[in-house]
Image: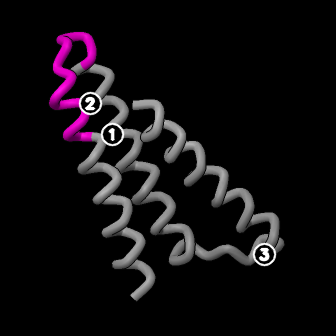
Amino acid sequence: MIIVFLALIRIIAEFFRLDHSLQGQLTIDQFKPYMAGAMLCAVSCFVMTILSFYSRHVWITAIAALTIIGLLVLKFVYIL
């Protein structure tokens, strides 16, 4: 769960890095992949937190793995 949360922080930080380096020229099309990745991480962190209350550790691990795979898929979809 910590890894997915750190990925969320990294995605949000990348937006601010790009905004600073492009000096306000960041368009919504350039921002879309970061928003999609941040939403994926935020929702999966929420679900993993809820599942941790019920001690569903296998499900938490599965969701974490699916989140990482989802982030990789997003990366390749927006690169091409």
Proximity of marks 1 and 2: CB atoms separated by less than 8 Å: yes
Please indicate whether residue 74 sits to the left or right of residue 65 in the image.
right
Check disc 2: other Cα within 10 Å, few if <14, some if 14-19, many if 20+: some
Task: Find disc 1 in the rendering and name its residue.
Answer: 43
Q: Is residue 61 above or below residue 22?
A: above
Residue 79 part of the magenta segment:
no
Question: How far from the left and from the top, in percent, is residue 2?
Answer: 46, 31
Residue drawn at x 78%, y 75% is 22
Mark 1 or mark 3: name the one nearer the start of the chain. 3
SS at badge 2: helix
Q: Amino acid at mark 1?
A: Val
Task: Find disc 3 in the rendering and name its residue.
Answer: 22
Mark 2 or mark 3: name the one nearer the start of the chain. 3
Q: Point out the residue furthest to the bottom here.
A: 80
* The C terminus: image quadrant: bottom left
Quarter of the figure with residue 1? top left
Task: Find disc 2 in the rendering and name its residue.
Answer: 47
Q: Nearer the viewer, residue 33 or 6?
A: 6
